[in-house]
Amino acid sequence: MVATLCCLLVGSAVGTLGFLREAIEEREAANSALALDLAVHQVMAADRVISAGGSRSEFTHLAGAVTALDGDHRLALHAMSAASATQAERLIAETRVLGGDILAGRRSSVSSNSPDDLVDLLHGVAERASRKGTTAERIALVFALLGAIAATLAGWLLIRSRATEFRLRDELTHQATTDILTGLPNRRVLDRVLDRARTDMATSGGVTGIVLLDLDGFKNVNDTFGHRTGDRLLVEVAARLRRAQRAHDVLLRLGGDEFAVVLVGMPTADGAEQAAHRYLSVVDEGVEVDDRSEHLRASVGVATTDDPAALDTLAAEADLAMYEAKRAGGHRVVVFQSGMEHNATAVNRITRALRLADFDQEFSLHFQPIVSIDAREPVSYEALLRWESAEIGPVGPAEFIPVAEQIGEICAIGRWVLNRVCAQLHDWDREGRWPDLRISCNVSPLQLEDPNFVLEVTSIVDGWGVDRRRVVLEVTESTVLDAHGAAVARLAALRDAGFRVAIDDFGSGYSNLGQLLQVPFDMIKIDRSLLVTLSEMREHAGGDPTSPCAIMTAIVSIASVFEAPVVCEGVETEDQLRSLRASGITHVQGYLTGRPLPAAEAFGGSSQSRERPAGVPNRARQLPATAA
Ligand code: C2E
Ligand code: MG
Ligand code: MG
């Protein structure tokens, strides 16, 4: 099409020019003939005047006519045949002589018929040339019209292809800047939004903030339910965030399970934390996944600035704050504070080392006794994980457990711990020691979110041939209170299957007794922080450190509703122990009655079995097939 149009354009241009040239030449020939004709007529008029006896003074145009006849007549002659041209040349010469004789006042010897013959000849030439010129003009016009049509078509094609180009470019930009799954702007848009905010802040001031939201345990959702379900969840989260979006907020999906909201044009930084809580609250609701009700949780980091130059680091600061939220157990909002960058470096090192860790070589368990106050005898031990990283040396569980949760390693670690605990119980059984002693394992909230958790725990414990009643699963108070139907049902199922459940870290957060009543448990463990706070309060008030504590007594009476014993953690002094006993507490766990120690030291000579039941790999990601 384009090639045809180009040919048409060139052809029409050539045609138009060719015929225009011809038209001009013919017109010039006609004009030359007509000019000659006029001169001849002036000579003829003079001749007639002389013949009629007129005065010479009346021949005003004769001199000009003679000069004209003397001039160049090639154009007119060129339009004639060769014979006519020769005749015309002769007639022109004769007419010029006639004109010259009249001017000179001589009687001319030239035939006065010559001008008449010449006029006839010139008329014919002028007519013919004029006709030819008109025809050439018309053809040139047709060519010009064809050219105009071709040019219009080519122009239209050009505009259309430009429009297509613009559309494709627009689509490409849209694709490059939009997250396909959720339809939200993607990470690439963040820089643009911040650039615009920088300009706005420089001209009209104000504060810009970034709220960074990362789903907790999303890797588990993907691993458990598959990527399709994970994608559906992300779409749902995007829809919820959109609903909470305010006019000036820019909502983006940065990738994976990470979303960001840029808060632009805020008068002060005060609103940012509030906005972050608003976004967290819309995400933090139950969601239906594959006919199951699951609970979404998220960690949120917030950073703000009123300095346009500080916008470059704003996203990184929000990121650090978000990591702090994760480290603190997730499901919360953390506002950036300087100093967090040091923590982040540590988290990065832990993440790397954890990914490379050889569980059997680097992990071990320490056991701390839970002691009956009256008998001063252990009733059970809590297994506490220790990590001597080959890369970075020893790391405490408070540091690496949140990272393990964040990178999705916690379930594998949990399986490793449970296998080790079962190995210990199995050793005792084999040695015929402590048939009534139990061992507690800490269970991460993320493990509870796994629909296979019940099956997994039962298979591991049964695989070792260990009595289920000797395994206590410790879940934190906050896990239980945040737990949705499915997690609580899993705890109930484990209890029905014979396992014991302890509520760990009681009193470290907010307690909703109504919700607590929904959860099946066999033991409450009061958090060390509550004991410390209450001891300090009493010290301030100058009270007797060994007297009963009303709050501890209240907790004991709540637990008595469930017939569950209360253990107080972190007991370090005899005064604390006395006060707790006076308050009705029956069991304690703390440095006073026994520090966490390796199995060999904790159990006096018995070293924990390292042999695994057949089929249990190093990282204990799979279930044991049979007991050893
Ligand atoms: P937790 O389950 O509440 O464990 C009790 C913590 O209190 C332990 O800290 C223990 O060493 C410490 N503790 C016990 N008595 C005293 C005392 O008298 N004074 C003081 N200052 N501390 C005392 P640890 O071993 O550092 O563990 C910290 C937390 O890490 C645990 O708190 C638990 O939430 C988590 N954790 C430990 N092992 C595991 C595990 O295998 N899996 C999971 N998911 N979490 C674990
Ligand atoms: Mg515990
Ligand atoms: Mg605890």
Image (spheres, grey):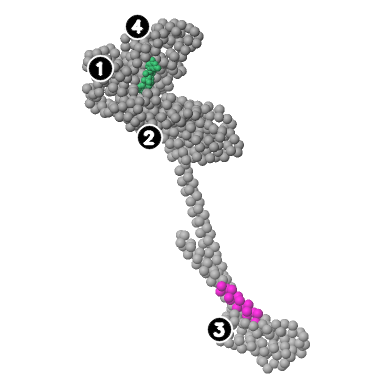
Q: Is 90 placed left or right of 49 in the picture?
A: left
Q: Residue 327: x and y, percent?
A: 42, 26
Residue contact between numbered discs 1 and 2, judged by CB atoms under 8 Å: no
What residue is disc 2 on? 228
Mark 4 CB within 8 Å of ligand 1: no
| Mark 3 → mark 1, Cα distance in angstroms | 135 Å
The residue that appears at 57% across and 73% down in the rendered structure is 23
Mark closer to the chain start, 4 or 3: 3
* Label disc, if present, on residue 585 of the rendered structure: none
Mark 3 CB within 8 Å of ligand 1: no
Circle nearer the viewer, 1 or 4 = 1
Residue sticking out furthest to the front: 393
The residue that appears at 67% across and 92% down in the rendered structure is 110
Q: Residue 336: x and y, percent?
A: 49, 29
Q: Residue 80: x and y, percent?
A: 57, 82
Mark closer to the chain start, 4 or 2: 2
Give the extent of the magenta segment: 21-36
Circle nearer the viewer, 4 or 2 = 4
What residue is disc 1 on? 606
